[in-house]
Amino acid sequence: MNISRWPNNARSAVVITVDFNDEHGILTQEPRIAGREKSLSVWRYGAKRGVDRVLDALDEFNVQSSWFVPGRVAETHRELVTRIHAQKHEIGNIGYVCEDFDTLTLDAQKNVFKKGQAALEHALGIRAEGFRSFTGNWAQGFADFLRDEGVTWSSSWRGDDLPYFHVPDNGTPLKKPLVELPLHYELEDEPYFAYNLSPAVPVGQPRIPSYGEVLKNWKHDFAAFHRFGLCFVLRLHPEIIGTAGRIDVLRELLADIRAHDDVWFATGADMAAWWHQSVTGNEPGHPVEVYARHKQEQA
């Protein structure tokens, strides 16, 4: 990729995403946590304190971000979600209660998307343009369904440092296929900081790492993404990054990125629009193309 391809001759792009799942994400990951109020309070902390701190940090550095909000959170924390939207952050769909798509049929996946979309529309008067599958997977045909529902981008899959297009399941080229903004585990706060003792979350991996070392990891990754002209997608959670101590990890990272005058900060919708405008297709041999051909051969 030409490293001057981004708008205004920026060398790299940055998309900050935030999953405001409240208690629903952990209940999907670890059903045994249901009814354990002490443990659930760890994840409810985002609504209590974390959202405000994250919003303040983004405002301090003039960064617009993309927030994924389950429909149920839009109902139970409508004032907070309205404030996020009012501060010009994009709101995306992550289902109704962060459902595990690995356990759902295609029709069930469509239904929870629609339920989440309806809740967001009722709370905010908008239809989300971005989608994130909580568990990262979906059934064959779901990407086509998302596009038909007006979704332009997803940030659910992995496998690249640049956006790419989902290949339609019927193999027919589309004028505006769904854009994927791929994730990396090392560019998320949860693998470093998520921790609960009883029940153990994550099982067998108790850790509270050095904040400074995590910051150094993220700065090192950004420096490499910037050097190669890539798209740096960060995935955060207000209950995790929004604690009194950890919020400065985000602030210092944003300060480091803002020290560069050739970085394009974009929302997911901004990135999808730019990718559709500027890129005609995936690189030859891209894994998503290989996988699509394999599925078509098996059909």
Image (cartoon, helix red, strand yellow):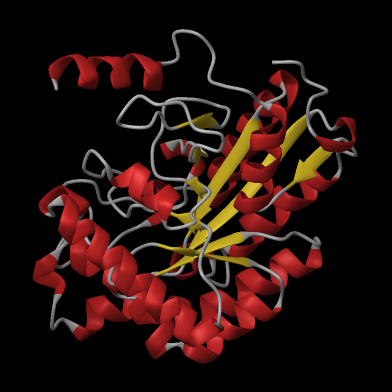
Q: Quadrant of residue 126?
A: bottom right
Left or right of 158, for residue 162: right
Given residues 162 and 272, the one toward you in this image is 272
Residue at x-position 50% and y-position 68%: 238
- Residue 120, percent from left and from top: 45, 77
146 to the left or right of 201: right
Q: Residue 77 appears at what percent x and percent y?
A: 45, 87
- Residue 206 vertical placement versus 79 (above, below): above
Q: Nearer the viewer, residue 291 or 261?
A: 291
Q: Is residue 34 left or right of residue 293?
A: left
| In this view, 21 is above or below 155 | below
Identify which residue is drawn at 64% across, 36% down: 276
Q: Quadrant of the C terminus?
A: top left
Q: Is residue 206 above or below residue 162?
A: below
Task: Estimate the x, y position of residue 112 in percent, counting from the top left.
Answer: 26, 66
Across and down, in percent, residue 48 comes to 48, 85
View extreme (top): residue? 285
